[in-house]
Image (tube, grey):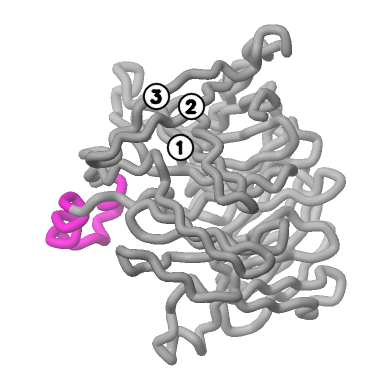
């Protein structure tokens, strides 16, 4: 396993370099504040699948999914392997389809298996601490925060799908008591917001008690705890078309019809990363991975939900696949650019560490 421990930035050296970029968003170009944190460590992990990554509570250990959604790889930022565990199966410590990894207290790792409808808690070495069944007849759209005694996620039942009510915007928030497996809390999004382009894609609750909806054509809808609604179009949204790398990624595996790929090629990309990669940091700010560029660099946009204000973009190296955030540490799963060092033409994936303490 290749690992590089880079020089960690000091406070005096400004951990984040502040720059200004012009984001070409149609006719009204917006000046977007872009922060470029210094990457202080990187670890190449073979076989990374998907973009789910969990930064554990020590802020030095990260876990990713490998080997066809049935294996987990935990490493620290110096490249040491902390644990490799999991295999296909239905027993304890086995998986059918891992969809999400999430950090918890005391360096615990939570694992959601959609197919088994099960949530498991592990030590990063692979020791199983506990299993709990998730609510029957559904699948998690996405976890909304780190777990402690409860697991919180956006939930959609197959019954809703059968009735044709598949709008992800109004999926309920479900909180499950990990000790008992009982549903401790359920909350329906308070409003069905509207945007000019017409489509709300999904919504997530904020730590402050409101909601954020991700909508079409770069629109975000912020709903305050008091129900106040603000629609904001992302200043960095460009409406760019997919490039050859995007199309190749979409068509990987040969499961997408040629006409569907051609339609995709000629349709502006979503503002958000298709894996719905978003996090709230400890200050309650909303971080969302975007589809902008994703070649030499990628961008995460940061918002203050309560004020419905765009704070700026954080630029990271290479093609972002997924990320996690805790304290002053940002970890990113990236796909490197194919270079002459990759004679097979397969891009390598890695985990990069950034210090974002300068993001005020």
Residue appearing at x 40%, y 87% in the figure: 164
The residue nearer to you, when weighing 317 against 309, is 309
Say whether residue 137 is left or right of residue 176: left
Residue 102 lies, in percent from the top left, at: 68, 52
Residue bearing mark 3: 21
Q: Is residue 101 above or below residue 73?
A: below
| Mark number displayed over residue 320 | 1
- Say whether marks 2 and 3 touch (CB < 8 Å): yes
Residue appearing at x 70%, y 65% in the figure: 152
Say whether residue 88 is left or right of residue 296: right
| Mark number displayed over residue 34 | 2
Label tally: 3
The answer to which of marks 3 and 1 sits earlier in the sequence is: 3
Quarter-of-image position of residue 55? top right
- Please report the bounds of the magenta region as a residue range: 249-266
The answer to which of marks 2 and 3 sits earlier in the sequence is: 3
Front position among marks 2 and 1:
2
């Amino acid at each position: 396993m290749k690992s590089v421990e880079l020089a960690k930035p000091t406070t005096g050296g400004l951990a984040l370099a502040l720059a200004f970029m012009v984001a070409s968003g149609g006719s009204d170009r917006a000046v977007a504040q872009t922060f470029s944190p210094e990457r202080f460590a990187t670890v190449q992990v073979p076989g990374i699948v998907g973009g789910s990554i969990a930064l554990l509570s020590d802020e030095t250990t990260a876990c990713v999914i490998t080997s066809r959604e049935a294996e987990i790889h935990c490493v620290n930022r110096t490249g040491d392997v902390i644990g490799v565990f999991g295999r296909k199966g239905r027993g304890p410590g086995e998986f059918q389809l891992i969809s999400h990894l999430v950090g918890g207290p005391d360096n615990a790792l939570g694992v959601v298996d959609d197919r088994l409808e099960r949530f498991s808690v592990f030590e990063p070495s692979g020791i199983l601490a506990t299993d709990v069944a998730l609510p029957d007849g559904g699948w998690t759209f996405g976890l909304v925060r780190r777990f402690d005694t409860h697991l919180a996620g956006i939930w959609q039942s197959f019954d809703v799908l059968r009735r044709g009510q598949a709008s992800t915007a109004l999926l309920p928030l479900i909180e499950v008591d990990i000790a008992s497996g009982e549903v401790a809390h359920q909350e329906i999004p308070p409003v069905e917001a509207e945007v000019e382009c017409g489509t709300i894609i999904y919504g997530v609750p904020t730590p402050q008690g409101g909601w954020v909806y991700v909508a079409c054509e770069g629109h975000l809808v912020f709903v305050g705890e008091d129900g106040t609604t603000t629609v904001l179009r992302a200043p960095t949204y460009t409406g760019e078309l997919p490039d050859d790398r995007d199309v190749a990624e979409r068509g990987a595996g040969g499961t997408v019809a040629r006409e569907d790929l051609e339609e995709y090629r000629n349709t502006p990309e979503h503002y958000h990363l298709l894996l719905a990669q978003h996090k709230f940091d400890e200050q309650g700010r909303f971080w969302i991975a975007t589809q902008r560029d994703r070649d030499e660099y990628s961008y995460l946009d940061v918002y203050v939900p309560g004020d419905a204000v765009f704070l700026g973009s954080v630029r990271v190296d290479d093609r972002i696949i997924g990320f996690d955030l805790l304290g002053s540490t940002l970890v990113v799963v990236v796909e490197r650019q194919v270079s002459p060092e990759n004679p097979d033409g397969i891009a390598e994936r890695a985990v990069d560490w950034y210090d974002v303490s300068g993001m005020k």
